[in-house]
Amino acid sequence: MVDIEKISETAMEIISYSGLAKSCYLEALHFAKTGDFLQADEKIKEGDKSFVQAHHGHGGLLQEEMEVQEPRISLLMTHAEDQLMGAEMSKTFIMELMELYKNQKKETSGV
């Protein structure tokens, strides 16, 4: 039987951790824009820790669903998965932008 309360609780954890990850990734971009790549890298690592937490929650629900072979679809869970995917895409784009900022700094400093 589907435990909607547990699914909702886990979905909220996924949303929270995904949001924390995205915030850290955006902070990393801010630091990169100002040339502080050490702080930017630290924020990426911090964001990755939150992302892993969100990913584990999601993976746990998927594994449980496979074991009971009963679909567990809810609007809240769909939103949680969207947030998780958004955090992953944010990191991908932000890492590319940070690389551009690093290259730009190298070019302007003559290194």
Image (cartoon, rainbow, N blue to C red):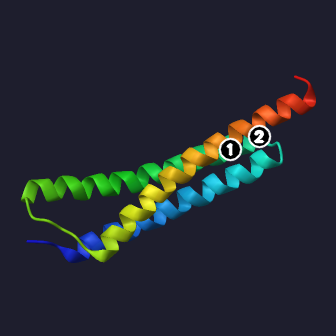
Mark 1 Cα shell of 10 Å, populated few (<14), some (14-19), many (≥20): some
Q: Which residue is mark 1?
A: 97
Q: Quick one: quadrant of the N terminus? A: bottom left
Mark 2 Cα shell of 10 Å, populated few (<14), some (14-19), many (≥20): some
The disc labelled 1 sits on which kind of residue? Answer: Leu
* Contact between labelled residues 1 and 2, with CB atoms less than 8 Å apart: yes
Give coordinates of residue 20: x percent, y percent.
Answer: 55, 61
Q: Is residue 32 above or below residue 75?
A: above
> On the image, which quarter does residue 42 sit in?
top right
Q: Which residue is mark 2?
A: 101
> On the image, which quarter does residue 76 sit in?
bottom left
Instruction: Find residue 35 and name its label.
Output: none
Q: Is residue 101 above or below residue 31?
A: above
Q: Relative to 61, is 25 on the left or the right? A: right
**In front here: 15 or 83?**
83
Q: Residue drawn 50% across and 56% down?
A: 87
Q: CA distance from mark 2 to mark 1?
A: 6 Å
Give coordinates of residue 65: x percent, y percent.
Answer: 15, 59
> On the image, which quarter does residue 110 sit in?
top right
Q: Residue drawn 76% across and 35% down?
A: 102
Q: Is residue 109 above or below residue 9?
A: above
User: Circle 1 sits in a helix, a strand or a loop, which is it?
Assistant: helix
Q: Quick one: quadrant of the C terminus? A: top right
Residue that lies at the very extreme toward the top in this rendered image:
111
User: Circle 2 sits in a helix, a strand or a loop, which is it?
Assistant: helix
Give coordinates of residue 25: x percent, y percent.
Answer: 62, 52
Q: Residue drawn 82% across and 35% down?
A: 104
Report how many numbered discs are placed on residues in the image: 2
Q: Residue drawn 83% across and 48% down?
A: 34
The disc labelled 2 sits on which kind of residue? Answer: Tyr
